[in-house]
Each structure stands twice: as structure tokens, then as C-alpha cells.
Image: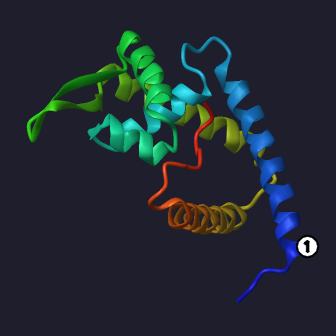
Amino acid sequence: MSVASTTAAKLVHQIFDLQRAVRCVAAANLRGDDTGVALQGVLRFVGEGETRATQLAERLGVSAPVLSRHLAELLEQGYVVRRPDPEDGRAQLIALSSAGTEKLRSIEAQRAATLQGFLQDWSEDDVEETSRTLKKLAESLRSSARAKTAGSADTTNFVEE
């Protein structure tokens, strides 16, 4: 199955429109918050489980120096903790602190409530169908990007820097 060039172009425009809309939703939730969109993205990925910074940078699609700056800020705010990796004493594992877990829950609840308010005219089926489609799109884009960049130093950024 192949997608026509004009159809792909339309989808690209829709994705950019969606990105702008999501930034507006995120901006509405950032007022008075001590974490920006990028830090919230890092917090979300750290919240998926303890990991090495190198693995986290790879999953986020950011360089090690960019991630290092974000982690330093999150450490300073008390949202993440580091500990030596028992399998490799030179490496460290990154995890959420209890304050970080609470912060992530708060961010996600606030975003969900905001989105819920914005989608009052949507049915539950509309949201479920859109969620499935976006998940499929994200999985396809990630796997294609990984396949294309496998073996190269170039990575695709999935998180704003």
C-alpha cells in the first residue's frame, strides 16, 4: 500500500497544525509552572522507568548535552534522582523522585483536564478513534526514522529542545 504524494503533503500540513495546537494547549498549562514543555517531556520519559541517560537521550531523540542540561534543571528542582548503575559503576541511572512523580501526575492531570474541556463537542468514540490513529502514526514514524538513522549519528528529535 502506498500513499500518494499529495496525500502525504496534506498529512504533513495537518501534523504541523496539530503541533501548533498542542503547543497552545501546553502553553495554557504552563502559566506559573516551573517546568517548560521540554522539561515536561523529559520528566514523562523518566517516569516510564529508571534508565541510563544515554538510553534516555536516544529515546527522546536529543543529544547528550541537551539532555544533560534538562536533567541538571530537573535535579535542581528535586524532580529526578541519580544513582550509580550496579551493572556499570561508571554509568548512572536516572529516575523520578517522589516529588517528580507527583509533578508528573499533576502535569498529566492538568493537561487531560484542559484537553477534556477543549473537546467537549467530541464523542468518546471520536477520541478513541483519534487516539488509535495517532498511536499508529507515531509508531510508524518512529520505526521509519529509526530504520533510516540506524548506524548513523543523526537522530530525529521527538522532543522540543
Front one among 98 and 160: 160
User: Could you tell me if residue 155 is visible in this image?
Assistant: yes
- Secondary structure, mark 1, is helix
Q: Is residue 51 above or below residue 81?
A: below
Looking at the rendered image, the quarter that the N terminus falls into is bottom right
Q: Quadrant of residue 130?
A: bottom right
Q: Is residue 105 above or below residue 32?
A: below
Front one among 30 and 136: 136
User: Measuring 88% from the left and 65% from the top, which residue is drawn there?
Assistant: 10
The location of residue 102, given as percent across then percent down, is 39, 25
| Residue at which label 1 appears | 6
Front one among 106 and 72: 72
Q: Quadrant of residue 54?
A: top left
User: Measuring 47% from the left and 62% from the top, which residue is drawn there?
Assistant: 150
| Numbered label tally | 1
Is residue 8 toward the left or the right of residue 128 in the image? right
The location of residue 2, given as percent across then percent down, is 74, 85
